[in-house]
Image: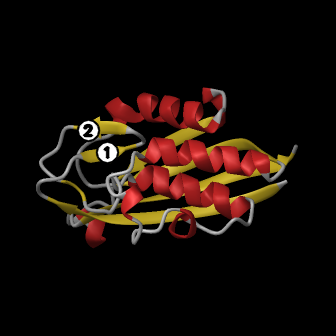
């Protein structure tokens, strides 16, 4: 068995959609990034890639490559899951935490879990997503950005 950790952060800006876990969330601000800037899925992918010692999302989907401009991170997660399987590993479970002051994410957690499970070829019981605030502290507390952490357990097929 192998474990990986992923972390990502994106700045909140006007004029962008807020997409987390493949779910478009109504909000006045969205995340800035080369792709869809889905900070949750980026952390999940980095956790999977880390567990398999396959680098990180910057290696596989560089922000200097125009083909990833506006990319759907759920499709990128499907690629990472397939790559991991081709390397001889099976994803066992994923646990992730989104850190955002606003908006409240509880109504969207189930759909995020379903999206991650489907893209990763997992049963939903193997995917957990949590959301928390930083009680007004730090960059996420002041609504300058949103970050996410994730861990993933994999094993040899």
Q: Dividing the picture into quarters, in which one does residue 59 lie?
A: bottom right
Horizontal relation, residue 105 to residue 82: left or right: left
Residue in view at x 73 percent, y 44 percent: 91
Place of residue 106 in the rendered image (x, y in percent of width and height, measured from the top left): 35, 35
Q: Residue furthest right?
A: 157
Q: Is residue 150 above or below residue 7?
A: above
- Residue nearest the viewer, comparing 94 with 65: 65
Pick whichever of labels 1 and 2 is earlier in the sequence.
1
Callout 2: few (<14), some (14-19), or many (20+) C-alpha neighbours within 10 Å?
Answer: some
Q: Using the image, tell me which numbered label, if any, was put on residue 25.
A: 2
Residue in view at x 72 percent, y 50 percent: 84
Q: Using the image, tell me which numbered label, if any, was put on residue 27.
A: none
Horizontal relation, residue 95 to residue 41: left or right: right
Q: Is residue 14 above or below residue 144?
A: above
Q: Are marks 1 and 2 in contact (CB under 8 Å)?
A: yes
Place of residue 16 in the rendered image (x, y in percent of width and height, measured from the top left): 18, 52
Place of residue 81 in the rendered image (x, y in percent of width and height, measured from the top left): 65, 45
Residue in view at x 42 percent, y 29 percent: 111
Q: Quadrant of the C terminus?
A: top right
Residue matched to label 1: 19
- Residue nearest the viewer, comparing 139 with 22: 22
């Amino acid at each position: 068995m192998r474990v990986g950790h992923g972390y990502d952060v994106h700045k909140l800006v006007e004029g962008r959609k807020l997409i987390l876990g493949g779910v478009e969330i109504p909000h006045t601000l969205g995340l800035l990034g080369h792709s869809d800037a889905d900070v949750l899925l980026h952390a999940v992918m980095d956790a999977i890639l880390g567990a398999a010692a396959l680098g990180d999302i910057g290696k596989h989907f560089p922000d200097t490559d125009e083909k990833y401009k506006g990319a759907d991170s759920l499709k990128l997660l499907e690629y990472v899951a397939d790559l991991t399987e081709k390397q001889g590993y099976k994803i066992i479970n994923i646990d992730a935490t989104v850190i955002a002051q606003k908006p409240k994410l509880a109504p969207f957690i189930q759909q995020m879990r379903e999206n991650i499970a489907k893209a990763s070829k997992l049963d939903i019981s193997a995917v957990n997503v949590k959301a928390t605030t930083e009680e007004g502290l730090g960059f996420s507390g002041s609504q300058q950005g949103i970050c996410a952490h994730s861990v993933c357990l994999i094993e040899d097929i």
